[in-house]
Image (cartoon, rainbow, N blue to C red):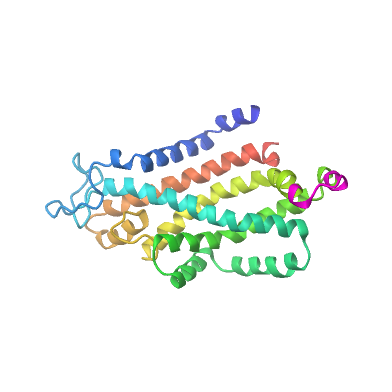
Amino acid sequence: MKMWKKFFKSGLGVLGVLIILILFITAVFASSIAPYDPNAQDYNMILQEPSSEHLFGTDDLGRDIFSRVVYGAQISIKAALISVGIAVGIGVPIGLFTGYYRGFWDEWVVMRVVDSLQAFPFLILALAISAVLGAGFGNAMLAIGIGFAPSFVRITRGQVLTLRNMEYVHAAKSVGVKDMRIIFSHIFPNAMGPIIIQSTLTMATGILAEASLSYLGLGVQPPTPSWGSMLNQAQSLMSVAPYATLYPGLAIFIVVLGFNLLGDGLQQFLDPRARK
């Protein structure tokens, strides 16, 4: 209870929760919040400045930017959850088993592959995988998830290496508890804190990565509204309609900030070293 109170007393952590809550509400109720169809084109309203009729103005096809930003929240939520889900699904089991059993496969195969993947800048790796798989949201999520997986392997393995030497693990072994039960009942629950913190922070990077791939044409394909693709389409309008890039860029900034603030707040709550 004291830890929860400390978390809620952390203004930045609570601000992160509020930002993400607003993002989820926007994504779920997009059809009710958006005043227009995000793909509806009105050639009589091309490049209209922000007004009471169009809060964020219109783009070069007469589409309402506010509606497109609202619907873009759905893509960002999916990008954060799917990419991190793929990374956790790949990285955590590998980290658990290699960290627990150690040996040749851990030191000379798995960790060398992880080192090789992490030697590449993340976005370059995601771009390369997307280029091989082809454009599209699904392929972009798979590419981003694979790019994130090595960090989850490393952080999970590090936790297991520490926990496998704890007294309660040795006690479980001494009474004949099987390895699978030790891994999933004794080690994994105690390794969850850093994994949750890493997942939250990685969601912010996942949103940035999706926006980057969509901006480059390898992610969400038009006319589906995505903040990254909106920036791509509006970049040529900077001199005549700067608001067309302002609002999707601001949305990316605020949401990424929210996930980072939440991650910092969770670190204060879940990491014993941070609570001291």
Locate residue 249 relative to residue 147 in the image: left or right. Answer: left
Report x, y in % for residue 121: 54, 66
Q: Quadrant of the C terminus?
A: top right
Q: Is residue 37 left or right of residue 78?
A: left
Q: Is residue 132 magenta?
A: no
* Residue at screen point 34% across, 39% down: 29
Our reading of the magenta stretch's main secondary structure is helix
Of 104 and 271, nearer the camera is: 104
Q: Based on the picture, tell me whether residue 178 belongs to the magenta stretch.
A: yes
* 31 versus 48 height, above or below: above
Residue at left 54%, top 47%?
200
**Residue 229 occupies which quadrant of the picture?**
bottom left
Q: Position of residue 262 (x, y in %)?
A: 53, 41
Q: Residue at x 64, y 47 (%)?
A: 194
Quarter containing the N terminus? top right
Residue nearest the viewer, comparing 146 with 176 = 176
Tell me where residue 119 appears, x and y as whole percent: 60, 68
Instruction: Specify the farthest residue to the left.
Output: 44
Q: Residue at x 60, y 65 (%)?
A: 118
Give left or right: position of 113 versus 174. left
What is the residue that sits farthest to the bottom in this orientation? 132
Q: Quadrant of residue 36?
A: top left
As drawn, the residue found furthest toward the right would be 174
Looking at the rendering, the stretch of residues picked out in magenta corresponds to 171-181
The percent coordinates of residue 169 (x first, y second) are 81, 46
